[in-house]
Image (tube, rainbow, N blue to C red):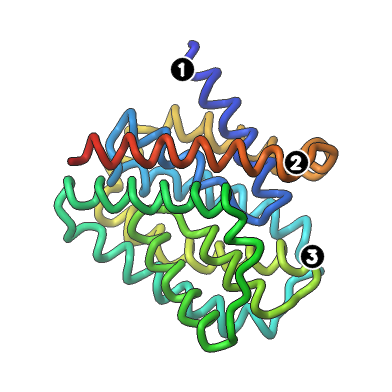
Amino acid sequence: MAVTLALVGLAVAAGGIAAVAGFGIGSLLTPVLALLVGARLAVAAVSIPHLAGSAVRLWILRHHVDRRVLLGFGLASALGGLAGAVLQGALPGRGLALLFGAVVALAGASELTGWVTRRRWSRPAAWAAGLLSGLLGGLVGNQGGIRAAALLGFEVPKESFVATATAVALFVDGARVPVYLASQGDQIVALWPVLVVLTGGVVVGTLGGTTVLGRLPERMFRRAVGVLLVALGVFMALAGG
């Protein structure tokens, strides 16, 4: 019961943060679930609540999507996501765990240093970063930080930033989820009680995120997320090694 309540709370927080920042579901849920079921299955399983939360968020923000950015950047990210999902099955478990931990820790460090919000990409670099973020999304389920930094290079308004980042995330999910289901479908289905809890929590957090988290100092919760990600990333890398 305690584990279930903790997962619900984390899922609600992840959905809420993503509603404000445009990412955060995979960043928070994947490393925690990996502690219970291993990195490979966690990446595949979390893609389900990630897909649900992103779909709800996109519906709310659908009128703010920048279609010009989405068509190019989103397709590049989707290609990266498909490639990452395919490559994930070829990586040995130890190598995947090490890569997973390193990426999660770096994502946390970028939050703590503010690198994500300060970095400005040229347009070609932003496209390359879109491909890279999709690749990491397919491999280790953690793509939001790089995607957010790359999207800043297109200089879209705040509402369009979150909406377009969400639409891009759905492009990546649409490319990677079928691969996960084909390769790990039975294992994912076996986790259905956990996935129902996580998906429900993410949807609730997404619906209430703008109202609740919008009143909190952004710097406070982003730093808290950064510390959590660094700690989980280091732990997973050490465990994988």
Q: Residue at x 46, y 17 (%)?
A: 3
At label 1, the amino acid type is: Val
CA distance for labels 2 and 3: 16 Å
Residue 165 lies, with reference to residue 26, above or below; the image says below
Residue contact between numbered discs 1 and 3, judged by CB atoms under 8 Å:
no
| First in residue order: circle 2 vs circle 1 | 1
At label 3, the amino acid type is: Lys
Residue contact between numbered discs 2 and 3, judged by CB atoms under 8 Å:
no
Number of marks in picture: 3
Residue 47 in the image: state x and y as whole percent: 45, 50
Residue contact between numbered discs 2 and 1, judged by CB atoms under 8 Å:
no
CA distance for labels 2 and 1: 23 Å
Callout 2 secondary element: helix
Q: Residue at x 77, y 60 (%)?
A: 61
Residue 227 in the image: state x and y as whole percent: 52, 37
Callout 1 secondary element: helix
Q: Nearer the viewer, mark 1 or mark 3?
A: 3
Q: Residue at x 28, y 46 (%)?
A: 40
Label 2, residues with CA under 10 Å away: few <14, some 14-19, many ≥20: many
Label 3, residues with CA under 10 Å away: few <14, some 14-19, many ≥20: few
Residue 3, label in figure: 1
Label 3 sits on residue: 158
Residue 108 lies, with reference to residue 215, above or below; the image says below
Locate residue 69 relative to residue 64 in the image: left or right: left
Label 2 sits on residue: 209
CA distance for labels 1 and 3: 36 Å
Q: Nearer the viewer, mark 2 or mark 3?
A: 3
At label 2, the amino acid type is: Gly
